[in-house]
Image (tube, rainbow, N blue to C red):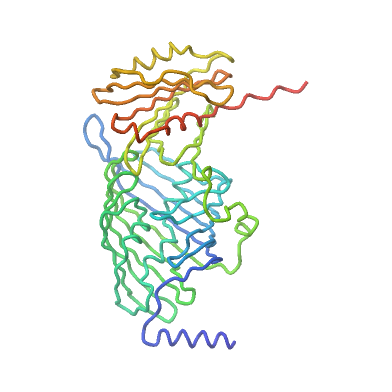
Amino acid sequence: MRWLGTFATALIAATAHGQVQLGEETKVGDLARVEVSLTLQGTMKVERDGKPEALPMAATATHAFAERVEAADARGATVRVRHYEAAKSAGDSAGERTTRELGADRRLVVAQRGDVGTLHFSPDGPLSREELELVGEHFDPATLPGLLPNKPVQANDTWAIAPDAVQRVCLLEALDKADFAGKVTAVTPTAVTFTVAGTAEGIDNGAAVKLTVSAVGTFDVAAKRVTNLKWEQADSRAQGAASPASEVKATITLTRQPLAEEPKALDITARAKVPADGKSTALMTMLRYTDAAGRFQFVYPREWHVVGRTKDHLVLRLLDQGEFTAQATLTVLKKLDVGAQMPVDDFKKLVMAVPGWLPETVSEDGVVPTEAGSRLYRLTAQGKQDGVAVQQTFYHLASAQGEQVAVTVLARADKVAKVGTRDLSLVNAVEFPKPAAPAKP
């Protein structure tokens, strides 16, 4: 009771003149439960038959997770461990509906703050691109402290929001300019109501982005936390190497409540999977791709982006710091009999007859060492594709069981050095299904 009286006295003193300390204090062991919901409406801009066309698009998403601060510094949490109860989205673009949901074996996720953005990974293994987007592209409560002035405020006080805080909260890879400000609209002994508004321009996945934000939030004085936020954002994005142009409006609502007890999903046993220093291993940051028909799978670095897929084709683009560097097209070829392989000369004839391809020189031609049981043949040539100077590398990967894929990697002549050996690493990661074990007698 004495503690309660002391707390009440301090609270009254803090608000006696209408002033409250508006800032979050983050420390290791902090626990919270977060819910985030999204609704989005807009248009995706594409080109059909040489003419621009705007296709309607809409999406919804819901996320619910508990999180624990594992490491922190003066700027706030540097590592958070999250367990997702729910993470799913549904979208409709031009009548095509898609749904996504975080896999049950990837519900434990680490959010590690970096120099620019936040790295998300699962200590249980590589995420798929769709899973990464689910956990890495929703509104991040870790960015909330950067929106606050961290000083005593009263009604109608305003403050400028730092550019690095704008970049993080808007999920931009690079920030060109920003003009964000906060304002206190009401102060009571228990809560502060504030607004955030502004505009920003930057880069996301290599595409130029212009956005406008209007938000209102509630700061709980006793908890020293932002507990509610409604964030409205209008987005204009230019076409990028891995995404189409778009115009969208999104509304995000967030609730966050402190947890008094550590949930079992985040107890010391569950957190034992997280690296001791909070940092990811190389494998944890990789992504995984599994063919829908089960014909192949591979793990790959995040700079490769899937931009197209059909029944027998998969197209990826390599973005180097947001810059389109190369394109890889994987084609599933007809399965051969066990032990059979396409002759190298037949593969050469096939790739050299690609429409629009005029080879000039060949720099590599031969078998590349790979895992036992598979053969990898590579042919690298320089020439012109549809009149543009390029280098193309053609790979043929075949298993002892008769599975085979062809991978064509195309890069403009001035981008070849940036590709380096990343194309070979991508192809070498492709795995075919393991042969069934012989039946026991």
Query: In front here: 136 or 286?
Result: 286
Residue 138 appears at what percent x and percent y?
42, 53
Left or right of 123 on screen, residue 410: left
Q: Is residue 211 above or below residue 194?
A: above
Q: Quadrant of the N terminus?
A: bottom right
In the depicted view, which residue is nearer to us: 93 or 110? Answer: 110
Please give the name of the residue rendered at 57% of the width and 85% of the height, measured from the top-left corner: 3
* Residue 32 on image: x %, y %: 52, 64
In this view, the residue farthest toward the left is 51
Q: Which image quadrant for residue 244?
A: top left
> Which residue does the image show at 40% across and 44% down from the upper left?
91
Tally of marks: 0
Name which residue lies at 34% across and 14% down: 353
Q: Residue furthest right?
A: 441
Q: Picture quarter containing residue 166? A: bottom left
Q: Quadrant of the C terminus?
A: top right
Left or right? Give the position of 185 relative to 274. left
Q: Please provide percent x and percent y for residue 364.
A: 40, 20
Question: Residue 193, image x and y in percent?
Answer: 37, 73
Towards the viewer: 188 or 338: 338
In the picture, measured across the screen, residue 242 lies left or right of residue 264, that is left
In the rendered image of this protein, does residue 298 appear above or below residue 104?
A: above
